[in-house]
Image (cartoon, grey):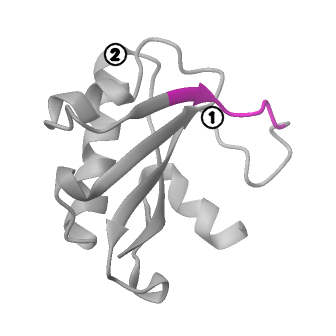
């Protein structure tokens, strides 16, 4: 069994606890559905937010989803100038490390809301 990385990102309309948890819950749920993940498959999750999100840790959403045994880490993204097309305000990104037999080519990354533009310009 290999460890594979699954990327995802989303955005929020505001910097609030509810907005961050809701957007992260939606993102993690979509990643889990598209990749048939169970919490036991997840070796670790690393969340980042843009510096304009400070009201809550995205990891709080993972805990609410029952990911109690998954090591979680939160950090801020680099403050990339807004002129860069990959710079988004109020953006939450995640890298999940999962134990799986699924080949890399079959892993589904998920980009929701305003973060969908990251797949167009990246």
Q: Residue at x 21, y 63 (%)?
A: 37
**Quarter placement of the C terminus:** bottom right
Q: Which mark is residue 17?
A: 2
How far is mark 1 from mark 2, CA to CA?
Answer: 16 Å
Q: Is residue 69 shown left or right of residue 14?
A: left
Task: Report which quarter residue 65 is drawn in.
Answer: top left
**Residue lying farthest to the top in this orientation:** 55
Residue 50: where, in percent of width, then height?
A: 63, 30
Q: Residue 107 sits in which quadrant?
A: bottom left
Q: How many marks?
A: 2
> Tags 1 and 2 in contact by the CB under 8 Å rule?
no
Tell me where the magenta segment starts and ends, as one range: 74-80
Position of 28 relative to 108 (above/below) = above
- Tell me, yes or no, if residue 48 can be seen here: yes
Quadrant of the drawing holding the N terminus: bottom left
Q: Which mark is residue 27?
A: none
Mark positioned earlier in the residue sequence (1 or 2): 2
Q: Which residue is mark 1?
A: 89
In-front residue for pair 27/36: 36
Where is residue 93 shown, x and y percent of the image? 52, 44
The residue shown at (64%, 72%) is: 120
Left or right: 61 in relation to 75: left
**Front-lying residue, 106 or 13:** 106
């Amino acid at each position: 069994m290999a460890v594979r990385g699954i990327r995802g990102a989303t955005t929020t309309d505001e910097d609030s606890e509810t907005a961050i948890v809701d957007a992260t819950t939606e993102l993690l749920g979509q990643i889990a559905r598209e990749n048939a993940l169970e919490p036991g498959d997840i070796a670790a999750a690393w969340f980042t937010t843009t510096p304009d999100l400070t009201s809550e840790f995205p990891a709080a959403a993972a805990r609410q989803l029952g990911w109690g045994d998954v090591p979680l880490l939160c950090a801020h993204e680099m403050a990339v100038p807004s002129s860069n097309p990959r710079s988004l305000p109020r953006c939450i990104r995640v890298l999940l490390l999962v134990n799986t037999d699924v080949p890399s080519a079959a892993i589904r990354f998920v980009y929701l809301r305003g973060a969908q533009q990251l797949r167009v310009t990246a």
